[in-house]
Image: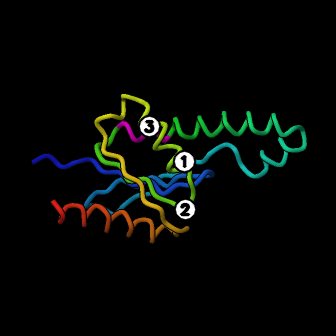
């Protein structure tokens, strides 16, 4: 039986920690949104409309980068404290490229990296036992 490629992504609107579920120690790769607090401050000073346009564009780039990573996996868990995971999930569901990928979401609090890794391990190992 072929092992399923599984991925966990802890995310908020600013950054995403990407963790592949393997038997090896989990490595974390981070993708950051370019729309930082500093960007927001600069944009607000110019105009609110400009800020929203810039934010939407940079969030779209951020979600696209995450989508490129997700394409390589068969099962993906999106988790974190904000609605960023819901926004990404909705974008992915509209794209047929992701129709064969099992994507689930879980609401969690802010977590440090150890907590994130433990969450991924628990989630995917419990999933194996429930088959």
Within 10 Å of disc 1 (Cα), the crowding (few <14, some 14-19, many 20+) is some
Q: Which residues are magenta?
A: 66-71
Q: Looking at the image, which residue is at 45% across and 52% down?
A: 18
Circle on res. 31: 1
State how far apart marks 1 and 2 are (Cα).
Answer: 17 Å
Q: Quadrant of residue 99?
A: top left
Q: Which marked residue is nearer to the observer: mark 1 or mark 3?
A: 3
Residue 69: image location, x then y, percent:
42, 40
Residue ID at (81%, 34%) = 50
User: Where does label 2 land, which residue?
Assistant: 81
Asked if the residues shown at circle 1 and circle 3 are in contact, with their CB atoms under 8 angstroms apart, the answer is no
Of helix, strand and loop, which one carries label 1? strand
Residue closer to the observer: 102 or 34: 102
Q: Secondary structure at mark 3?
A: helix
Characterize the local packing of mark 2: few (<14), some (14-19) or many (20 or more) Cα atoms within 10 angstroms: some
Q: CA distance from mark 3 to mark 2?
A: 19 Å
The residues tagged by marks 1 and 3 sit, at their Cα atoms, a distance apart of 17 Å
Pick the quarter of the image with the C terminus.
Answer: bottom left
| Among the two numbered marks 1 and 3 on one chain, the one whose residue lies closer to the N terminus | 1
Overall secondary structure of the magenta section: helix
């Amino acid at each position: 039986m072929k092992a399923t490629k599984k991925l966990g992504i802890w995310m908020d609107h600013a950054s995403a920690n990407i963790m592949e579920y393997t038997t090896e120690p989990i490595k974390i790769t981070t993708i950051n949104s370019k729309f930082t607090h500093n960007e927001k401050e600069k944009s607000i000073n110019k105009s609110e409309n400009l800020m929203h346009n810039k934010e939407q564009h940079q969030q779209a780039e951020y979600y696209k980068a995450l989508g490129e990573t997700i394409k390589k996996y068969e099962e993906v868990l999106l988790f974190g404290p904000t609605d960023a995971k819901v926004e990404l999930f909705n974008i992915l569901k509209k794209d047929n490229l992701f129709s064969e990928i099992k994507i689930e979401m879980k609401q969690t609090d802010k977590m440090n990296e150890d907590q994130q890794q433990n969450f991924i391990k628990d989630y995917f190992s419990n999933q194996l036992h429930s088959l």
